[in-house]
Amino acid sequence: MTLSRRFSTTLGAIAILFLAVVIHILVVFGIPLNVQHSAYDNIATHGPDRQFNLLPDVRPQEEALPDLDPAMKHAACRFQLADGPILFDAGIPTTFWSIGLFNTAGEALYSLNNRTAGADRLSMLVITPSQLSILRENPPENLEDLIVIETDEIGGFALLRAYVPHQSRADSIDRALEAATCGVIGES
C-alpha cells in the first residue's frame, strides 16, 4: 500500500468517526425533545399545585392523562410533602368516587374509594414518617376522623375520580371536584 493510499484510508476513517460522534451528540441532545412528559409534568399544565384542578372530559386522542375512564370526571392535584403534610377533603355527590396517589414517576402509592373508606366524604392526610412523629406531639382535633397515609415519597400527585351516572349530573360533580381541597395542613 502506498503512502497516499494509507493517508486516504486514515482520513476516511477519521471522517467516519467524526461523523459518528456528531450524529451521536445530536441524538443525545434530541432525546428530551422527543420524549413525552410524565403524568406529573402533564398535570402542571392544568393548574397550580396544591389544589384540585378539573381535567377536561375524556375524548379520544385528547386525554389529559393516559387511560382515563370516559364515564368519570377527573381532578388532579400536584403536591410536595416538603411543604408539609397534605390534607385532602372532598364531598362528591355520586355513587362512586376514588382517589389515587402517585409519585412523581407516576407509580401508584395508594388508592381508596368511597366503598373501602366506608364514608361518602374524602378526608385523608398524606404525611412523611418524620412529619407524623411531629404531628403526634400536637395532633389536630379531627385526626381520628382522617385516613392517614404515611409515605417516604416527597412529591407526587393525586387523581380524584367521580362516576357520572347521567349527563344531567355532570355539572354538580364538576362543582364538587372543583370544591375539593388539597393543601398543606393548617393552610387557609
Image (tube, rainbow, N blue to C red):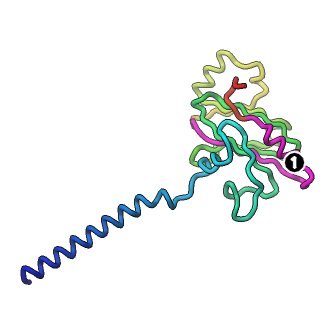
Question: Which residue, given by chain and number where applicable, does mark 1 sit on?
Answer: 171
Q: Please name the residue shown 68% across and 43% down the image.
A: 47
Q: Is residue 77 magenta?
A: no
Residue 69 placement: quadrant: bottom right
Left or right of 11? Residue 137 is right
In the image, taking residue 137 as reference, residue 59 lies left or right, namely: right
Quarter of the image with the N terminus in it = bottom left
Residue 33 visible in the shown view = yes
Image coords of residue 43 (percent x, y) = 65, 48
Which stretch appears magenta?
Answer: 153-181
What residue sits 67% from the left and 57% below the top?
66
180 inside magenta stretch = yes
The x and y percentages for residue 45 are: 64, 48
Q: Secondary structure at mark 1?
A: helix
In this view, the residue farthest toward the top is: 138
Q: Is residue 110 at least partly visible in the picture?
A: no
**In the rendered image, the vertical position of residue 59 relative to residue 132, given as above or below:** below
Q: What residue is shown at x 88% (from left), y 45% (from top)? A: 172
Q: Image check: 174 left or right of 82?
A: right
* Residue in the foreground of this view, choosing between 182 and 111: 182
Q: Measured from the top left, where is residue 57 in percent x and y?
A: 77, 55
